Image (cartoon, rainbow, N blue to C red):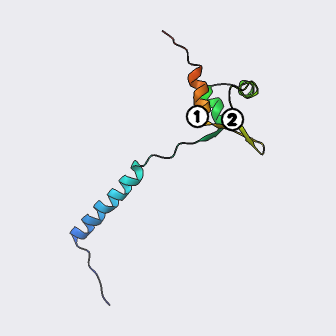
Amino acid sequence: MNYDLATKNDLEEMKVTLLKAIMSNSAAKPEAKKWVKSSEVREILGCSPGTLQTLRVNGTLSYTKIGGTIYYSIDSVNAVFDNNMHNTN
């Protein structure tokens, strides 16, 4: 039988390589959501289900309905949020 022995330097090199790989994977930003569901929109805007329905009906907030689930573009949700900010000064 042949045995390969790992030296202390071999183990140190392996540790450095693994740490670099882990750091590069954790440094990558997770992809931001493009679409959100009603519950997430209500949390972002701080509104009730009725208010969210009103925003859909009057065209303030665009949406897509697939099956029974309504999805909103996060960009349009952020636009509604930004457009309704008031200066408190």
Corner quadrant of residue 60: top right
Q: Label 2: which residue?
A: 38
Mark 1, secondary structure of its residue: helix
- Bin the neighbour count of mark 1 within 10 Å (Cα to Cα): few under 14, some 14-19, many 20 and up: few
Q: Is residue 79 above or below residue 72?
A: above
Mark 2, secondary structure of its residue: helix
Q: Nearer the viewer, mark 2 or mark 1?
A: 1
Find out whether the residues at labels 2 and 1 contact each other: C-beta distance under 8 Å.
no
Residue 66, labelled with which disc? none
Alpha-carbon span between mark 2 and mark 1: 14 Å
The answer to which of marks 2 and 1 sits earlier in the sequence is: 2
Q: Amino acid at mark 2?
A: Ser
Q: Is residue 74 above or below residue 89?
A: below
Residue 75, labelled with which disc? 1
Q: Is residue 32 above or below residue 6?
A: above
Task: State the image coordinates of residue 56 (x, y, percent, origin top left).
Answer: 73, 29
Q: Amino acid at mark 1?
A: Asp
Q: Is residue 36 above or below residue 21?
A: above
Task: State the image coordinates of residue 85 (x, y, percent, origin top left).
Answer: 56, 18
